[in-house]
Amino acid sequence: MTAHVLIAGAGIGGLGAALALAQIGLKITVLEQSDAFGEVGAGVQISPNAYKVLCDWGLADALKQTANFPERLQVRNVRSNKLLGQLEMGEKAQVRYGYPFSTFHRADLHALLLNAVRQRPNVELHLNAKISAVAESNQQVTVTTEAGNSFNADALIGADGLRSRVRQHVLGDSEPRATGHTAWRALLPIGHVPPELQQDQVTAWLAPDSHTIAYPVQQGKSLNIVYCDENNGQIGQFNGVNATQPAYLLPKQLSKVLQKVFQTATEQNAWTRWDLFDRPPMTSSTNMFNPAHPHIALLGDAAHPMLPYLAQGAGMALEDAQALAVSIKQNPNDLPSALQLYAQSRWQRNAKVQTRAARNGQIFHAKPPVSWARDAAMGVLGKKIMDVPWLYGYV
Ligand SMILES: Cc1cc2nc3c(=O)[nH]c(=O)nc-3n(C[C@H](O)[C@H](O)[C@H](O)COP(=O)(O)OP(=O)(O)OC[C@H]3O[C@@H](n4cnc5c(N)ncnc54)[C@H](O)[C@@H]3O)c2cc1C
């Protein structure tokens, strides 16, 4: 009999899992709490490791229609705009890792996955389906939604994000950790930004306690800009809230090019504020699969939320989804073993990425004299420091 799997959440991770599991022939039901499918109006970097996963799912042609392929990653000083280091991407990334380094508007990437999922007759998608309770009995999992509807299946995948209801059921641990860091995001029409920022590259400007990242998305039609800082108070209250540029940004002596972009984003009322949460790096596979709940596993931010400073949260969710399908394909008649093997195959990599993401924050936001040493090292070893073969070259 075909196994039936429930997936909580239709974010990038949930849709990736739905597609991967549908491709191996399972019956899938996706439950999404929102009243519409979608993603936030911001950019996302998809590095070669995650791009490979999407290509393995047959999405290579669709990806090319919406992706940007940055020619390089650059690191600059926030005040002088001086180049500190750079790593060639473009064709070179393709040669080094077999897959390109890419950037997307999130809505485009999400729509691409949704479209692929919708073409699968073995996937059912439900909106307005906020899971409020989970129960287990007789080799089955039952979830109940706030509207009072119940769904039964052979397994449940918690891809329901940072404040996962499924995680609460299987791990019962504390709330995610308020890191004290905040991301301010804006998306600007490319014609409204200085010419040097219209180039297809990812640029990071470093400063004590903050950094800014910018890259074009929507095949060069918009510039995605993210300003991240720490310790600015009122932490934990803002999630995608439209926000005016905080007054403390401008006096920070930004370079002219950044001042221009920040002013434009403020004039266009384009900033949204996101307070950032994470969890400590996972310490065992139990963080993704608790043997006491053998028909349930966690994936993506539900399992391993992290700071965005390695740009890998969505990438790890996609890798999780692929690993889950591989594991179930190898153990089609024993879902608990398949879920356990999935967690065992994933937790160490996810933990390493969580750790490195937090460490990148410390490096990006270093103060003098540490920042002087960092900048000097960038000048000599920039390429080596910025390249992460263990991450990008993962197969
Ligand atoms: C500023 C910023 C920049 C980032 N940049 C990058 C980047 O460049 N590259 C990268 O790879 N990652 C990046 N990330 C991380 C990435 O956005 C996340 O890791 C990724 O989106 C997680 O996907 P997910 O599907 O696991 O969770 P989510 O996207 O949170 O999806 C969870 C889904 O579950 C639904 N849901 C929640 N609760 C329930 C419930 N009870 N019942 C039913 N449905 C429910 C939600 O509505 C949502 O649709 C960034 C994050 C931030 C904050």
Image (spheres, grey):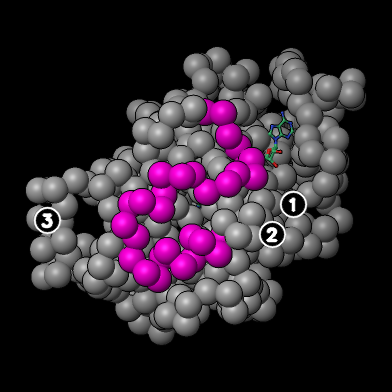
Percent from the top left, x then y, of residue 42?
60, 57
Query: What is the span of residues highlighted in magenta in the rendered image?
Result: 236-265
Looking at marks 2 and 1 on the same chain, the residue that comes earlier in the sequence is marked by 1
User: Residue at left 76%, top 57%?
Assistant: 114
Q: Nearer the viewer, residue 108 or 246?
A: 246
Percent from the top left, x then y, of residue 334?
62, 34
Of the numbered discs in the image, which one, if any, rests on residue 107?
2
In three-dimensional space, the C-alpha distance between marks 3 and 2, rounded to whole angstroms, equals 38 Å
Percent from the top left, x then y, of residue 2?
79, 43
Q: Quadrant of residue 66?
A: bottom right
Please say whether residue 55 is visible from this viewpoint. Answer: no
Please say whether residue 256 is visible from this viewpoint. Answer: yes
User: Residue at left 56%, top 28%?
Assistant: 237
Looking at marks 3 and 2 on the same chain, the residue that comes earlier in the sequence is marked by 2
Answer whether residue 244 is magenta in the image: yes
Residue where numbered disc 1 is placed: 38
- Ligand 1's image quarter is top right
In three-dimensional space, the C-alpha distance between marks 1 and 3, rounded to whole angstroms, equals 42 Å
Q: In the figure, 156 relative to 48: above or below?
A: above
- Mark 1 is on which residue type? Gly
Q: Quadrant of residue 88?
A: bottom left
For mark 2, give the secondary structure.
helix
